[in-house]
Amino acid sequence: MTAEPKLLVKGWVPPKLDRPFTVVGRRINRRDAVEKVCGKALYANDIHFPGTLYAKILRSPHPHARIKKVDTSRAESVPGVKAVISRNNFKDWYTYWYKIPQPGFPEIVLYAGHEVAAVAAETPEAANEAVGLIEVEYERLPAVFDVEEALSECSPVVSYSDVVVPEGPFYATDKPPVRNVWGGGPAVLSRGDVEKGFEEADVVLERVYTTPFQHHGTLQTRTCVALWEGGRLTLYDSCQGIWQAKEDLALSFRLKPEQVRVIVKYMGGGFGSKSGAQRYAHYAAALSMLTGRPVRLELTRAEEFLSHPRRPAAKFYLKSGVKKNGRITAVWGRVLINAGSGGAYKPFKHDAILHPFYLYDCPNVHLEQWGVLTNLQFTGPTRSPLNIISSTAFESHVDELAAAIGMDPLKFRFMNYNPYADPVKKTRFSAKNLDKAMQAVCEEIGWDSPQRQHNGRYRTGRGMAVYMFHGVGFHPYEANAEVVVKPDGRAELRMGIVDIGTGSATTMAMVAAEELGVNLEDVDVMYGDTDGTMYAPGSHASRVIPEVGPAVLKAAAEAREQLFAALADKLKVAPSELRSERGFIYLKEDGRPLLSFREACRIANVEIVGRGSRAPNPGPYPRGGETSAVNFATFGATAAVVEVDTWTGKVRVVRCATAHEFGRVLNPKLVESQHYGGVLFGIGYALYEGAVHDKKTGIMLNADLLNYKIPTTLEMPEEIVCINIEAEDPYFAYSAKGGAEGINSAVPAAIRNAVYDAVGVWVNDFPIIPERLLRELEKMGSRDAV
Amino acid sequence: MVLKTSVEVELKVNGSLRKAKVNVYTTLAELLREKFGLTGTKLGCNRGECGACTVVMDGKPVYSCMVLAVDADGSEVLTVEGLSAGEGLHPLQKLFIEHDALQCGYCTPGFLMSLTALFQSREKITLEDIKHSVAGVVCRCGAHPNILRAAAEYAGLR
Amino acid sequence: MLCELPSFAYAEPSTVEEAVKILDIHKPYAKALAGGTELLNLMKDRVSGSSQPLPKVLVNVKKIRELKEVYVSGDGWLVLGAAATLEEVAANSFVKAVYHVLSEACSSVATQQIRSVATVGGNLCQRPWCWYFRHPYFDCFKKGGKLCYAVAGEHQHHFSVMNLGVCIAGHPSDLAPALLALDANIQIASVKGRRKIPVSEFYLDGRSQQDTVLDTADLIVNVQVPPTTQRRGMAFAKARLRDTWDFAMANAAAVLELDGRTCVGARVAMGGLSPYPFRLRKVEAALEGENLESSLSLYRLIKQAFSDAKTLPMTREKKNIGTAVLLETLCRAAGLPVF
């Protein structure tokens, strides 16, 4: 039995706002837009310090090799070179990323691009020259790149080097791999009896779906300037989490937390790839410590592709049984996740199989997720990490099941809709309105009266898909905020977050302004610096609004209460009789303002500091398959209309409708931008993007922005309709949850299902490049003329 | 003929005459960012494959990472810093803010300068013109629909 | 990503004669620098091999007036300086009015920003856009090595289906098919003097390490397009993955001499499907004398165009893409609706 739901903050819980919103819900311009459009925003590679050294990294050209010798003598004698680091002088050094300990310069390199050494020099030319002169003796080892090959008996074993930390931090591996199997075995979610379920089915379908390695493609590459000065390390970085980077660096260099400062005021895109202190930041910091000079390290675009943890590729085997009446009787699945040679896999070890387990009311389910190690670059969180894999494969599968019994795919989903969290134990989510999301997107694109074109060269069709996502906060639930109100009436919100482009500096300020009862213009925001702020989560995993939101709300409420207490005396009223709104203080039952907020601050004449801290969710985002009385997740759906050119195999997304369950939208203008970003990522995943590796050497062949094809303006649909599903969820600040990244999850399957509607072929391998589609069309013999 | 390894260049940047001595392998992007301190122009790939470094050179949009500084000698270059003359914002900048035509902001100068080149090139602009003008800049955050809205409004198309 | 270019020496000649002298003195390490959109990238990526030395001397040819000029000669030939930019040619009102296959081809290249600086000569001389060629790890045939790595490796999108040699990269130029279809000539200069060759003799096939007949110390001066007649229909089409930036999976140019609805002469050229741009002589022969009544009749004429293509596992479907592009080009050149 759960207690009455209340805002997830530690200590005193502010009462619910008892008036309509005056700030929240308005379309407000993001506050850092002016600097960005004027070119005045300083990103890490725009910041100059006198005496800066330039760093460059040497990377292994081989996918799997033991380093026998590193000779840096020729490099060291290049004029202008100030330091060279490698296994020679940094042997037992571990860099921490997401607090995962990884050898800074491993003895065995695990992928083509793995770091071997780094140089700092007076000029970039000297650094480049020196890197070219470092002589490394490699003993090449057999390497493996394909998941099924890696699982086979005779496969080479990837010398996984991330440190195994039993009972360790959230992201660190807790079990060693066994023969390329992460953690020694699969994650399994099971209920009922699948064999019995198959016997009960009228139709059984077996399919395989494959999804690509997707790269974040942040427009700014990994860049930082590290300054070691007076026993303190300051890092001007491009990361998504300043406090996480601070922790990581302190661990790597055995520093006290106060000795590390991380600053990120502007950064050029994250999408999950830049949380915590990444490898490059550690090398820059080490070089700065050795030389006592600022060190600037800027990765090239090719290095971006080669070295940053990307979304794993997957191969999803699914076998499902369905009755003619539309009920799914059994789902069996095995997904092989190509996790590369290391990285952040642990938190996601169930994430590719949650979707079929929780979203569909099928009594007999057996799902396995295998993390498989290969000699390819690390994998890690990428905008909707494994949710997109799950949705892409299973939503594609669902449409095939519906077609097998001749049922409309939307009707089929409603028929098997699970309104609970666990359908057997009937536990619930704090809010779940996926049915509304499905209905809304389908209505928007005219599901029941589609403008289809099934003949001729160009054919149109429509499709839909759903997803489940977090965006509700998670471990360690440590988010803090401060609201300072000064005697001059201005308020300052202080939070240790990075605004990565989502506009969180603006939306959090809106929460503070609303709760304080002032206008947004009266709130300053201090963010992006670990000095002067308290621990806050990284701006990833769509967690800022659900985690920092409550902390900000409480901090503002506390500040307001302190102001009222100080005023009460002077005005001879009880604090509980006061309320604030739009920059004025009122008596609760009275419409006339008593005085302005500014005047109240002047009278109170104290500096007020309100603080708020997030409390843990009382129940889980059911990652591990367990649910409790109340569980937390967000949900959404996408519907798409596509046009297929049957001669060239090109697919164009004409229109798209996306719906996400935000709880409450703090700023509709900024949220729409997030929808668009999700559509872009989803279209890329569905039609254009994917790392291409040479099968013999594992070398990434398209480590550039010409051959790794990010969709441009011309590939975006003519119209994207953004639907925000709002529903009370008292745990969160004004019910506001995150989930911007969730929106990408269902876009690929919606497109692929629309392609089927248009031309009658199922494509099960992503991306749906023209050659692939033409091949399927040819098999069907359904092409016109050409 | 004498071969050189460094050259003196002189060019107009945002209306002001600027001079520098550069290595022949220095790109215009490096000249603007590192020598002239105009860091508004961004580098995303250094290969002409992302468009973030777009500036207007002699009226044409170019990738400044692909133009050698020596080839910019004697030219007129407009960067994002030169868009707002004096105190106020350029109307296109204002529309970008109003329509939220940016998120992380890294590609924004590239889009603004591509559009500036277009709007400077002729009077009557269609939506097709706008789309093709911005087709050479990548945005990973998804600001495209809003960029088109801002540009369309500027062109008086709404 | 600072200073990714290697250092080099730089020359700025003002005449063709000066330029070829420097190219000759420093061969094979001297290269002409026109737009630089390919050359500088090859240098930044250190693409090199025994037959592809890393350039040490760049000869800036953009100050040579002869190479920049675009004009119509006294006897009606259109002359395009090798260093004229694609944007200049595409926007040229005479080219648009009279040789619009050329302006269409120029406008389809990459992006506006690249067309602002990329040149006619540079577009014709592009090296293979193959990811093995452009990666330092693979010593491929076109750089002086022995093998083509794409054949047994990844060969989707930009690889050829016809006329396979050792190299199977598809030719990336959009201008070349248009100039082939226009029977253009190329004027080349060297220390030995000047010569003129038709575009149809400019390219070598996939068995050759060099892409063209140019010696490393040669310099393209200009491209010359013969005078045209009024009765011509012409068109260019290109199929690519994204609608911007990307090279063609297949492209085609057609110039048809029309007498009413009857085709009395045809020039049809394609790129992307072969390591060098090629004329489809069988298709040309089939078109000549035909009454071009409908798109369907055109389709029947061309549908066997790639029947003897030797495709590879990942290039098979490019035959379809090639047929689609060819049909679209011919329909538009003939003034017929494209289905």
Image (cartoon, grey):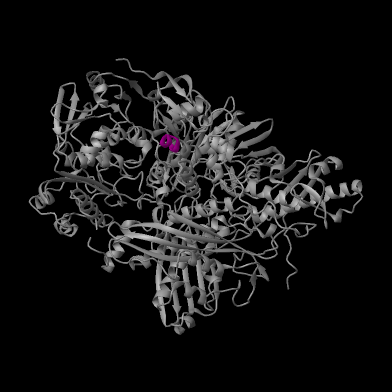
Q: Nearer the viewer, residue A459 or A189?
A: A459
Residue A553 seen: yes
Left/right placement of residue A665 relative to residue A180 reads right
Give how far across and how far down residue C64 sits, in percent: 27, 22
Left/right placement of residue A578 relative to residue A253 reads right
Total count of labels? 0
Left/right placement of residue A757 relative to residue A737 reads left
Q: Nearer the viewer, residue A128 or C4?
A: C4
Residue A54 on the magenta span: no
Identify whether A743 is placed above or below C75. Answer: below
Residue lying at the far top of the rendered structure = B2
Residue A406 occupies quadrant:
bottom left
Residue B116 on the magenta span: yes
Q: Quadrant of the C terminus of chain C?
A: bottom left
Residue drawn at x 36%, y 40% is: C111
Question: Magenta span covers which residues?
Answer: B114-119
Identify whether A102 is placed above or below A44. Answer: below
Left/right placement of residue C187 relative to residue C237 reads left
Residue lying at the far left of the rendered structure = C289
Give how far across and how far down residue A244 sits, in percent: 64, 47
Identify whether A278 is placed above or below B30. Answer: below
Residue C209 seen: no
Give how far across and how far down residue A633 sits, in percent: 61, 64
Q: Nearer the viewer, residue A151 or A640?
A: A640
Q: Nearer the viewer, residue B150 or A428?
A: B150
Residue C105 occupies quadrant:
top left
Give how far across and how far down residue A419 sits, in percent: 59, 73
Please name the predominant secondary structure of the magenta segment in the image: helix
